[in-house]
Amino acid sequence: MTLAPERSAISPTAPHVTQAQHVAAEQHRLNTRLSLEGGAERTHPPKKSGRPNPMGHLTNEQIEAIGRELDAIRAEVMASRGARDAAYIRRVIRVQRGLEIGSRAVLLFSKNKYAWLAGTAGLSLAKILENMEIGHNVLHGQWDWMRDPKIHSTSWDWDMASPAKQWQHSHNELHHTYTNVLGRDNDLGYGLLRVDEDQPWELFHLGQPIWHLINAMFFEYGIAAYDLELRGNLQNWDELSEEEKAVFKANLHEMLGKIRKQAMKDYVLHPLVSGPSFLPTLLANFTANTVRNIWSNTVIICGHFPDGIDTFETDSIEGETRGEWYLRQMLGSGNISGSKFTHIMTGNLSHQIEHHLFPDMPSNRYSEISPRIKALMERNDLHYVTGPVLKQAYQVYRKVCRLALPNEEPGRSRWSVVRGELGKVVKGKGGARTKRHLPSTADA
Amino acid sequence: MTAGLAEGVWKLASAIATPVLPDDYLDMFAPLRAGAELRGRITAIHRETADAATIVITPGRSWAGHVPGQYVRIGIDVNGVRQWRAYSLTSLAGAPDGTIAITPKAIPDGVVSNHLVHNARPGTLVMLDQAIGDFTLPTPTPDKILFITGGSGITPVMGMLRNLPSAGADIVLLHSAPRAEDVVFAAELAERDRSGQIDLRVRHTDTDGMLDLADLDREVPDWRERQAWVCGPTGLLDAAELHWAANDLTDALHVERFRPTIIEPGEGGEITLLGSKLTIDADGATPILDAAEDAGVLMKSGCRMGICFGCVVTMRQGAVRDLRTGEITTAEPGDELPIQTCINAVAGSCDLEV
Ligand SMILES: Cc1cc2nc3c(=O)[nH]c(=O)nc-3n(C[C@H](O)[C@H](O)[C@H](O)COP(=O)(O)OP(=O)(O)OC[C@H]3O[C@@H](n4cnc5c(N)ncnc54)[C@H](O)[C@@H]3O)c2cc1C
Ligand code: FES
């Protein structure tokens, strides 16, 4: 489907782009990703680390054909959405609310050991359902087609530190558009971890086997800080314009308000209402939040960081067509295998590949299309990454440990690169924040 | 004291329910309670003709009542999608059991009318707005009344007749329907004719042809002395307005239109931005987002390819076409439909809240 003449690629409204600049930049350009055809004949140079370009073996015609096939699958499923799907999401919401209110009621008596265990388990489950199968997916607009103003991406808010609107910007607009593009997709390690050989190494990464665990425990605050681009904004504070500073401050203010409300509920009011069970209730709520944090972190890292998933060079997406965008989504995501229960508890992010192809498709439909996506990928010699959750999470942790050290450089071991950098800090040259840019094996 | 206590408890409940509302929990158990969003539950369905049925609804406690002749907008989920339509109230105002009723007639390809007539089941929850409309009788009731109705246009008039005393005003009712078996409320109308409440003349247009208003002088010689209420197909209403105007009697005529605007999807057209009061001409291949930006308007956007929902704005009326699938979305006046501007092009015209 060609919608308009080929025009050059554009970038979305990022917070650091003023509206006026944005409008000026957008004029007379149309997103190339709206079109399947017209991609420039591409060369596929290897990446800086020397690894090959993951879509190098496909011709433009093959990529267009893949795009057409995926468009057809999408059209078929979207046309068949109906009462059955609407009943599904309403049932999940009802079950979640019942579980949440029931568990909180049981926790009023959590001085009793069994009440504590049952209430904590129930609340953990409720919070996981709320964040994953409901919140994440509603905020993606997967249920907007029902035209129910209560279950809608523009009105929903979730049980998370991050206000829905801010998360939608960093997640839906940036991560889903620029999935796994080095330097464009901050989800690649959340600005905290180095998860790809092609990401530059800093001394800071030495501690990442630990940062990773802390991030998992307090994941909702990690996401909040990430949505604010906290680290980048603070580091470059002096370079920000007044307008950017104002945006940041407004976002920060909104986020602190949300965090205060969330903390009030779980750590003050609910425990107070429990009276003599104050402390057990507080502990139960903390446990439930932590269980939810660790679980959602585990699911999410399995989506993009396990072995066999690819990343893409920044300039490789200039003028990218929809077919190429689809390809990048398939190669840049990985699934989790498991039972129906596992899929629901992951918010169907266990079907990460399907979700990244069609982020606005109702989540209950991913499992039904997954055999077709898998077949399509195998037919085109593309690796459909999947595995049980523990195996995938283990692979990620192994990678986090391995990439805590820089890549090997010609004639130098990884440790000697680290010693060199440490030495610079000690001597006061450079400093801990110096980025170690990757030596290109191609030059070596 | 108790009011203060109740307020305190409510505040506490809100703080514990955040980020949702205590209402969201109460809706699970008591969707019709006072203070809830206005809903209703279908309690009975009576078939009237092969393609019309009366739907009896118990409205929520916040229902404020209606004046006979008014209509209610109802929002019902058809195949998972919420659809809003207007229906005239046909029931007794202030009925002892608290119910209200509407009488939809299924039209070919009609999404909501067919669902209500053929598929809806008692027990279903629907969304409601308060009753509105000025197609009503004044008080005191005029001495001489002329009703002219066609097809489902009988509904608001039936609503009035059921609420009028059995004798009093001099009422003539000219009703048209294709065939005898298509007349909604046929038995009840005949009974009201027999009892003397109305002087009923039914016309079967399949055999007798359409009512020609030029014949009014013969059918109802004193029509000029009567206040007239007319409801039916667009052609009848247009003709009535011309006829009464030609006789300098515009003030005596009241009409109710079931199709106030007709939205015919086209290729490209005018995009009206209600906030900035700007109208933009766009072709059928350009996303609304691009058309508006080209006109210098600040629009919210994200991925620009339909996946992030960062560009959603509310369409108040009009039609747009999804450039990926060709699917048309239309909004009637009164609707508030969120649409993605990055993958929709205007199809005819559209009014957006920007
Ligand atoms: C104030 C008011 C009161 C109304 N009261 C009644 C009532 O008491 N009983 C009743 O049956 N209807 C009534 N209607 C009409 C009703 O709101 C719907 O328009 C009608 O039921 C068709 O809806 P649908 O979803 O079935 O058709 P849609 O799926 O919306 O439309 C299907 C096709 O029919 C055409 N169409 C839409 N509406 C009409 C119409 N009214 N007449 C002819 N063609 C149409 C459309 O252009 C489309 O081509 C009233 C409308 C208004 C504005
Ligand atoms: S800009 Fe992302 S859906 Fe429209």
Image (spheres, coloured by chain):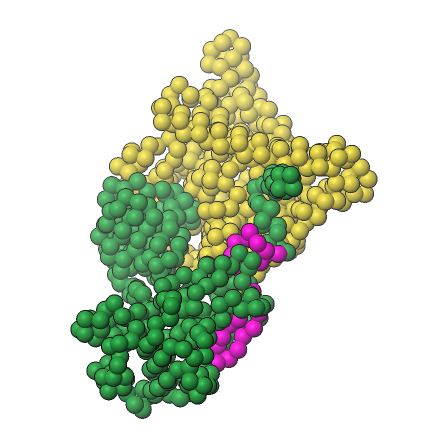
- Splitting the image into 4 quarters, where does residue A273 fall? top right
Of helix, strand and loop, which mostly describes the magenta segment? strand
Residue A240, image x, y percentages: 38, 23
Instruction: In the displayed orientation, state which residue is furthest to the bottom.
Output: B207
Residue B95, image x, y percentages: 53, 69
Stretch in magenta: B30-57
Q: In the depicted view, which residue is nearer to us: A136 or A418?
A: A136
Q: How many numbered discs sit on the rendered protein?
A: 0
Q: Is residue A230 magenta?
A: no
- Splitting the image into 4 quarters, where does residue A263 fall? top right
Instruction: State whether residue B43 is above or below residue A61.
Output: below
| Chain B, colour shown | green
Residue A157 falls left or right of residue B266: right
Question: Could you say which chain is coloured yellow in the image?
Answer: A
Q: Dividing the image into 4 quarters, which one contains the N terminus of chain B?
A: top right
Instruction: State whether residue A11 is above or below residue B49.
Output: above
Q: In the depicted view, which residue is nearer to us: B32 or A181?
A: B32
Q: Dividing the image into 4 quarters, which one contains the C terminus of chain B?
A: top left
Q: Is residue A166 visible?
A: yes
- Splitting the image into 4 quarters, where does residue B170 fall? bottom left
Q: Which residue occupies 23% across, 84% down?
A: B217
Q: In the depicted view, which residue is nearer to us: B250 or B78?
A: B250
Residue B90, image x, y percentages: 46, 72
Residue B48 falls left or right of residue B23: left
Q: Which residue occupies 37% across, 30% down?
A: A16
Residue A383, image x, y percentages: 52, 49
Q: In the depicted view, which residue is nearer to us: A343 or B46?
A: B46
Q: Which residue occupies 38% across, 68% down?
A: B140
Q: Is residue B44 magenta?
A: yes
Q: Which residue occupies 25% across, 58% down?
A: B268
Q: Is residue B110 visible?
A: no
